[in-house]
Image (spheres, rainbow, N blue to C red):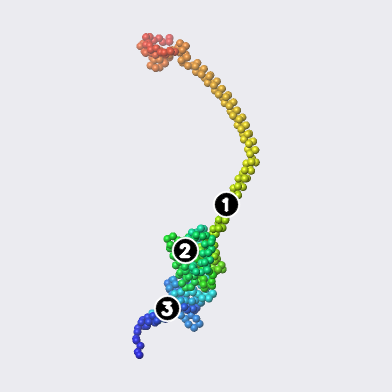
Amino acid sequence: MTPEIITVTQFIEVMNETLRYAFPVVAVEGEVSSFKVWQNRYVYFDLKDDKSTLNCFMPVYAMKLQIEDGMKVRVEGTPKLTDKGRFSLTVKSIAPTGEGAIKRAYELLKKKLDAEGLFDPARKRDLPEYPERIGLVTAPHSAAYADFMKIVRKRWPGLVIEVAPVQVQGTVAPDQIVRAIETFNQEARPVEVLVIIRGGGSLEDLQAYNTESVTRSIATSRIPTLVGVGHEVDVSLADLAADVRAATPTDAAQRVVYDRTEILQNLAHRQAALVRAVDDSISNYTKRLDRNSATFDTIVRQYLVALDRIQTSLNQSLGRVITAVEQRLAQQSQLLKAINPRAILDRGYSITRNKGQVLRTTSGLTVGSKLVIELGQGSIDSTVTGVHDGK
């Protein structure tokens, strides 16, 4: 039977279709070599073991951690033939394998993000003291979730806790955690604090919280963040990027809200202490008043006696001043009476006026001039019939 003749392009398409059907997703472990990033858009590297080498390709946005040559990794992707006829693996996700590789990837990414200032203490915010609404990102059926909810409900009943269910490990975990954080941040009325928690586990189990996407999402959240991942000794990149780090999910519950019972007890103690302090102050002032009352009475009596003496002295001085003034006024009155023109007129003298002017000489008078003669009582109108000078 003669095989059907097809073009090279058709052959590659058939092979890729066969590969997609037979191996939609494969997981391969190996050592990274020839790692490079092209135009900050694509990543190329080889995955090898003792005998073989596999060409790998992935978009740079899918690389959620830092890798380097010599690192042991596990990749998931789809095999295909390129247009050039080269066999490669289009990688969808990559994760280090083995404790050494995981720690190395952690250190590389930590160094990169630290240089960008994502872990700078100066950019961290305080959590609200009394939040009413809390956003929680975790696995809803986990022990971490159960412990957190139990403690928070006990410490501060009535809080609204909005839960975003996510997977906390595995290849899909980072994207789910990032979407949950973004969803909370995009709400018209966001929660007041965002809590991201998961229980303990191996370095590989906690890998989702050491990815670049999750770490950046926490660092750029407009809602203050509290992260409690793993055990107390575990410090993930998510912990470092958070506004507040909790050692464990239980510690996160204790940090996010106060214990209402303790607050009420403290308020009661403070109120009692304040009442005692006020009572003590009143008692002390009363004792001081009692001790000083006799002295106060004596001082008052002394002041009253002094005031009485001052009043008596003022009255005497004022009397002497009034008498002197009265005598002076009597003398002035007598003097005024003596020089009063009316008194002179009453003794038979008169005042003669010409045109309203008092006459002292005959100068300016002629026969027929009109005169007014003012007497002690009444006045006389007269006409000059003759003028005689003083000579």
> Picture quarter containing residue 308?
top right
Residue at the location (55% across, 58% down)? Answer: 261
* Residue 109 visible within the image: no
Mark 3 vs mark 2: give the one in front.
2
Give the mark, 1 or 3, whose residue is nearer the N terminus.
3
Residue at the location (45% across, 64% down)? Answer: 184
Q: How far apart are marks 1 and 3 (CA)?
A: 70 Å
* Residue 381 visible within the image: yes
Residue 24 location (% of width, % of height): 42, 78
Residue at the location (41% across, 13% down)? Answer: 378
Given the image, on which type of amino acid does mark 3 rest? Pro
Quarter of the figure with the C terminus: top left
Residue 116 location (% of width, % of height): 49, 66
The residue tagged 3 is: 24
The residue tagged 2 is: 162
Residue at the location (63% across, 38% down)? Answer: 296
- In the image, is residue 244 above or below residue 43? above
- In the image, is residue 78 above or below residue 212? below
> Seen in the image, is 278 located left or right of residue 4?
right
The residue tagged 1 is: 271
Mark 1 vs mark 3: give the one in front.
1
Q: Nearer the viewer, residue 31 or 186?
A: 186
Given the image, on which type of amino acid does mark 2 rest? Glu
Q: Distance between the residues labelled 3 and 2?
A: 37 Å
- In the image, is residue 6 above or below residue 354? below
Residue 41 location (% of width, % of height): 42, 72
Is disc 1 placed on a helix, strand or loop? helix
Give the mark, 1 or 2, whose residue is nearer the N terminus.
2
